[in-house]
Amino acid sequence: QVQLVESGGGLVQPGGSLRLSCVGSGFIFSIYAMRWYRQAPGKERELVAAIGRSGGSTNYADSVKGRFTISRDNAKSTVYLQMNSLKPEDTAVYYCYVGVSSGSWGQGTQVTVSS
């Protein structure tokens, strides 16, 4: 079955960096676009970044443009989210998503930005 496993979250000070990883299995990773979403307490889940099948096209939420970079390694079935210049408002659970079947989500990884 389709499985997405995120890692790399943690506690970081404002201005710091983290790199999230999401490993996919149970589907042909290289033929699907991938997305990162996040959900802060009391807020709706929002799209953070998306990347095309080959990695040639990317899109970002306005709130993270210039600070976050999405990338992928199809040989490793992994999508990454490099997060720089982190702000307290980036605190959320970050989820990986792929549009396989009706859509599949990972379990999420917590990112907390606080001094």
Image (tube, helix red, strand yellow):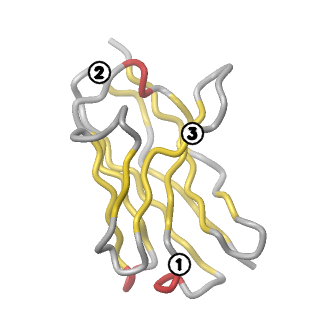
The amino acid type found where label 2 is placed reads Gln
Give the percent coordinates (x, y) of residue 84: 24, 38
Amino acid type at mark 3? Glu
Q: Nearer the viewer, mark 2 or mark 1?
A: 1
Q: Position of residue 5 (x, y in %)?
A: 57, 61
Residue at horizontal 53%, vertical 78%? 32
For numbered disc 2, what is the local secondary structure? Answer: loop
Determine the residue positioned at 46% across, 44% down: 48
Q: Mark 3 against mark 2, which lies toward the viewer?
A: 3
Q: Earlier in the sequence, mark 3 or mark 2?
A: 2
Whole-angstrom CA distance, mark 2 to mark 1, is 34 Å
Q: Which of disc 3 and disc 1 is earlier in sequence? A: 1
Give the answer, above or below, for where 107 lies relative to 11: below
Labelled disc at residue 32: 1
Q: Are marks 2 and 1 in contact (CB under 8 Å)?
A: no
Mark linked to residue 46: 3
- The crowd level at tag 3 (other Cα within 10 Å; few <14, some 14-19, many 20+) is some
Q: Given contact means CB atoms under 8 Å apart, are the residues at marks 1 and 3 in contact?
A: no
Residue for badge 2: 13
